[in-house]
Amino acid sequence: MPTPFSHAAVGFAIGAWTAPAPPSTRACVAAAACAALPDIDVLWSSGLPHSSPFAHRALTHSVLFALCAAVAVAAIFFRNERWHASPTRMALVLGLALLSHSFLDALSSYSLGIAFFAPFSEHRFRFPWTPLGRPAGMIVSQLMLESLLVFLPALLIAWLGWRIRSRRAVPAASA
Ligand SMILES: [Zn+2]
């Protein structure tokens, strides 16, 4: 299963490429935190049946949660225009980061899948291709595979986004 580090790296990359330019640390860190947030359900989901909306990979991994959390975080942390971000734009960025978590999880065979439409439907979804599953319980090989497929590419993409969009924004910012 994808680790919080991989989720956060993907979120940071989303922030670097989609937040208003130049990408700010605040926007990218918020996107990284949002991308890791859905796994907060491990705090209370132990022992719950998979049919429960509060089970692991259920409500906090749903589209509804992504929408609500994105709007809430944007309203709380990005109200002020001095962050070069409108709340609406940042809500979209953060929503994308939140949804990236569920889609990454759906690339793993760990658990029954993702309840994208909780609490309206308890149906679990998973992609036919699950490279981030548990290869015979080998945690080291799992982490290496995840690093190669997700973590390192996300870091590279984040770095590129940060550099390219910061440079492009320099003339406009100094004008
Ligand atoms: Zn998750």
Image (cartoon, rainbow, N blue to C red):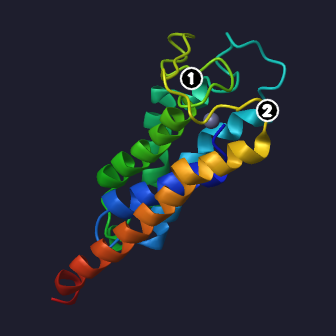
- Residue 18 is situated, as x and y percent measured from the top left of the image, at 32, 57
- Residue 70 is situated, as x and y percent measured from the top left of the image, at 45, 44
Give the CA distance from mark 2 to mark 1: 20 Å
Numbered disc in front, either 2 or 1: 2
Establish if 70 lies above or below 87. Answer: above
The amino acid beneath tag 1 is Ile
Dot 1, crowdedness within 10 Å: few (<14), some or many (≥20)? many
Say whether residue 169 is left or right of residue 124: left
Is the shortest distance between ligand 1 and the CB of mark 1 under 8 Å?
yes
Mark 2 / mark 1, whichever is N-terminal: 1
Q: Nearer the viewer, residue 111 or 28?
A: 111
**Could you say which quadrant of the image residue 165 lies in?**
bottom left
Are the two marked residues, 2 and 1, in contact with CB atoms closer than 8 angstroms?
Answer: no
**Could you say which quadrant of the image residue 85 lies in?**
bottom left
The residue that disc 1 covers is 114
- Residue 77 is situated, as x and y percent measured from the top left of the image, at 48, 60
Residue reaching furthest to the bottom? 174
Picture disc at residue 137: 2
Q: Nearer the viewer, residue 126 or 62?
A: 126
The amino acid beneath tag 2 is Gly
Dot 2, crowdedness within 10 Å: few (<14), some or many (≥20)? few
Quarter in which the N terminus is drawn: top right
Can you see residue 33? no
